[in-house]
């Protein structure tokens, strides 16, 4: 899965303000599920560390509440077929976490583009 698929550019992955808004969007969409993403320290690899941290939550949902994960994917607007395809990858939780972050970042970028 590449950035162009989501209409994202490399600069979007390092823009601290965009990533902060992305965290807010993730917290909104995840609702009552406790996330520890605010504890990830910002730096050059901030997006990658967010993916790694989010993958722990995704892994727990895959293990204990897959139906809840698929409900979240619906809310985030990620097709179930895409998630199902990622389940067969080497690191499904990491792949799904990356897709979640990219989709949420895309929402923030689009919202800014059309509100300016």
Image (cartoon, rainbow, N blue to C red):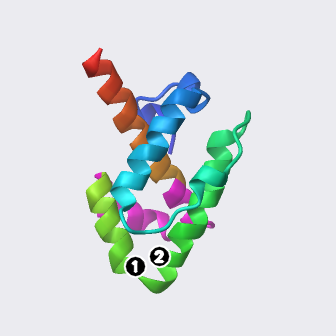
Query: Residue at horizontal 46%, vertical 40%?
Result: 22
Query: Residue at horizontal 51%, vertical 37%?
Result: 20
Q: Are marks 2 and 1 in contact (CB under 8 Å)?
A: yes
Could one spot residue 102 in this view of the protein?
Answer: no
Q: Position of residue 46 (x, y in %)?
A: 67, 40
Q: Position of residue 11 (x, y in %)?
A: 57, 22
Q: Which residues are magenta?
A: 77-97
Q: Position of residue 85 (x, y in %)?
A: 43, 64
Residue 12 lies in the magenta stretch: no
Query: Residue at horizontal 35%, vertical 62%?
Result: 31
Q: Position of residue 112 (x, y in %)?
A: 34, 23
**Residue 66: which disc?**
1
Query: Residue at horizontal 45%, vertical 36%?
Result: 21
Q: Secondary structure at mark 1?
A: helix
Q: Nearer the viewer, residue 40 or 5?
A: 40
Among the two numbered marks 2 and 1 on one chain, the one whose residue lies closer to the N terminus: 2
Could one spot residue 95 in this view of the protein?
Answer: yes
Q: Is residue 61 left or right of residue 13?
A: left
- Please tell me how crowded label 1 is: few (under 14), some (14-19), or many (20+) other residues with Cα within 10 Å: some
- Residue picked out by circle 2: 61
Q: Is residue 96 left or right of residue 79?
A: right
Q: What secondary structure is the stretch in magenta mostly built from? A: helix
Q: Is residue 30 left or right of residue 55?
A: left
């Amino acid at each position: 899965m590449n950035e162009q698929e989501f209409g994202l550019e490399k600069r979007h992955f390092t823009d601290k303000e965009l990533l902060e808004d992305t965290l807010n969007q993730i917290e909104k969409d995840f609702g009552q599920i406790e996330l520890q993403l605010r504890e990830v320290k910002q730096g050059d690899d901030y997006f990658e560390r967010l993916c790694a941290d989010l993958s722990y939550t995704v892994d727990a949902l895959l293990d204990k509440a897959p139906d809840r994960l698929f409900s979240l994917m619906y809310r985030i607007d990620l097709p179930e077929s895409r998630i199902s395809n990622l389940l067969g990858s080497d690191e499904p939780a990491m792949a799904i976490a990356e897709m979640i972050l990219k989709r949420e970042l895309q929402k923030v970028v689009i919202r800014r583009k059309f509100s300016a």
